[in-house]
Amino acid sequence: MANINRKMKHTPDVKSGEQYEELLDELLRESGAQISQRNQEHFDETLKLFLQAGCGQIEHSDWRNVEMISTMFEILTAKHRRLNPWKYEEYRYEDDAVFDPEPQIQQKEIYPGIDRFALEVLAADQHIKNGQRTKSQRVTKNPENDNSKKVKERLAKTRKGNLPELRVEDIAKGGLSGKQVVEDWARKNPGKIDKESGDFMANLELSLSRATSRTKINLAKQGPVSFPMRCHKSNRGKWGRYALIKEGSAGGKDTGNTYGIIKTDTEKEIA
């Protein structure tokens, strides 16, 4: 009887089963082990796959430390499920010899027959392909990645009721501070100034800053904001004839923004 048992241990079925169980046990042990205690024998081979796919060393290291073991376990067990559907709950347990000594169908368990190296390669390939699909989807969905004329025209059309976007050549004079813009507006609109409202120039400067911020926020909801940008989306606004050329620090009346006068209002430029 002892001789029979020794012979059975060397049969292909038993050996394949032992290899499968040993690999599963190894992955389970490593999932709770420190990184330094994990098998790094095939580190260079998986790194080569990542570099060939345009992925960096940091991504590769993070993948090995965080994702690789669990992915390998999922791949290995999924292969076993597909090879032996009768062992899992959607099939009849009575056909398994473990539960029925005389099953109607004699099922034979098939093992994946895959070693550690091949499993690491499959896990690496899965991560790389998933990353490439994600990048492709982002490029497709993000209009900023398409600089074609059609995309720019579509973005402009979504801003219903707004004036056309400005170009650099639409600016008659740039490099103006908020204070200079306010002074220019005051000279052009003397009858609209309430000089009895205290520090009216400071109030106007704060009004310019707030109007510019609101316009930028509203435009950002509809697509990428480009500069120069109108301080108000229509000419009916107090600051509709001025443009924000460059943003400065946030908040307060003196934001450090750089402004310009739009060409359609050049007859009374700042001296």
Image (cartoon, rainbow, N blue to C red):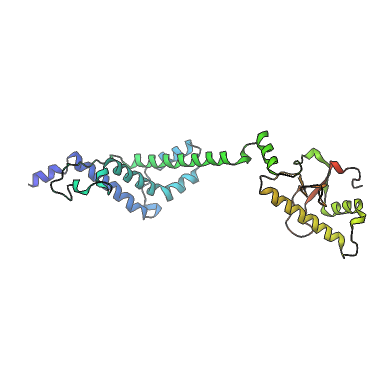
Is 122 placed left or right of 17 in the picture?
right
Is 14 placed left or right of 24 in the picture?
left
Is 148 placed left or right of 39 in the picture?
right
Q: Is residue 88 visible?
A: yes
Q: Is residue 255 visible?
A: no
Foreground residue among 137 and 18: 137
| Residue at 49%, 45% in the rendered image | 59
- Total marks shown come to 0
Residue projecting furthest to the top: 149
Residue projecting furthest to the left: 1
Residue 125: x and y in percent read 42, 39
124 is higher (above) or lower (below) than 247: above
209 is higher (above) or lower (below) than 56: below
Foreground residue among 69 and 179: 179
| Residue at 43%, 50% in the rendered image | 66
Residue 253: x and y in percent read 79, 59
Residue 54: x and y in percent read 51, 38
Foreground residue among 57 and 243: 243
| Residue at 57%, 41% in the rendered image | 141
Foreground residue among 190 and 181: 190
Residue 111 occupies quadrant: top left
Residue projecting furthest to the front: 161
Residue 106: x and y in percent read 17, 41
61 is higher (above) or lower (below) than 48: below
